[in-house]
Structure formats: C-alpha cells, structure tokens
Image (tube, rainbow, N blue to C red):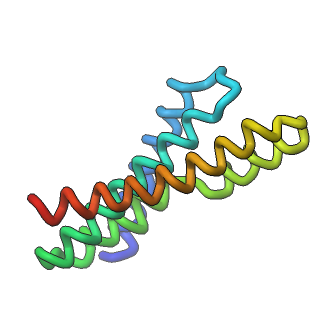
Amino acid sequence: MNILSVFIGGGLGCVTRYITSLTLKGHSFPFSTFIVNIVGCFILGFVFSYILKNPTHPSLKLALTIGFCGGLTTFSTFSVEGFEMLKGGRYVLFFIYTLLSFLCGLISVAMGAFLAKNV
C-alpha cells in the first residue's frame, strides 16, 4: 500500500509540475521550477507540522511528502538551470535565482508549518 501511495502522489506531483512548466515557459527567469519548488516547500512544511499535531495514516503521509512533493519539486532542474546561467555568463541572474530559491524555500516551509499549527 505504501508503494502505491508514493506512486499515485508522485504521478500527481509530476503532472502538476509538467502543467506548470507548460503554463510558464518562455521567460529568461525559470519561473516554473522556482514556483514548484517553493510550493513544494510550503506543502512539506504544512504536512510535517500538521502530522505532528494530528497523526495521519502512513500511506497518506507518504503520498503527500515523498510522492506529491517529491514529484512536484526538482532540485536537478534547478541545478541544470543554474549551470546554464553560469555557462551563459548570466551571473547576476544565477545569484538572484539561487538566493531567492533558498530564502523563499525556507520561508515557505516556515509559513506552511505556521499555518498547520494554527489550523
């Protein structure tokens, strides 16, 4: 059951990421990767904090965390996009993208955790 939960959650996360990439293509800044990573951080912060307060079925936890968030977010694409920025001499954009991704990711986890504690 756990493998099926991860499989279903991962599929939904991947499809969500793909739809986001179709919607947000054609920009010099990688908005699609940035948005899915930040949303994934928020969801993960929320789910982990919520589960601490309200124990949940293990399959649901796996479907949401490893499955959906794992399928939605993408560190590898973030890294490739950053590498391409460096190769292309777009150092300022690389710095902004990396810094924003890190800071907004942490803030999103904190916001998700805060929201879960106040639900």
Q: In the rendered view, tell whether residue 63 sits above or below residue 17.
A: below
The quadrant in which residue 97 appears is top right
Give left or right: position of 82 versus 108. Answer: right
Residue 56 location (% of width, % of height): 16, 75
Residue farthest top in this picture = 26
Residue 50 location (% of width, % of height): 19, 68
Residue 103 location (% of width, % of height): 51, 54
Residue positioned 19% across, 56% down in the render: 115
Report the number of discs: 0
Q: Quick one: 65 or 43, which is closer to the camera?
A: 43
Give left or right: position of 41 versus 55. Answer: right
Residue positioned 37% across, 60% down in the render: 109
Residue positioned 20% across, 78% down in the render: 52
Q: In the rendered view, tell whether residue 23 sits above or below residue 105.
A: above
Give left or right: position of 107 versus 25. Answer: left
Residue positioned 57% across, 42% down in the render: 33
Image quadrant for the N terminus?
Answer: bottom left
Image quadrant for the C terminus?
Answer: bottom left
Residue 65 location (% of width, % of height): 37, 66
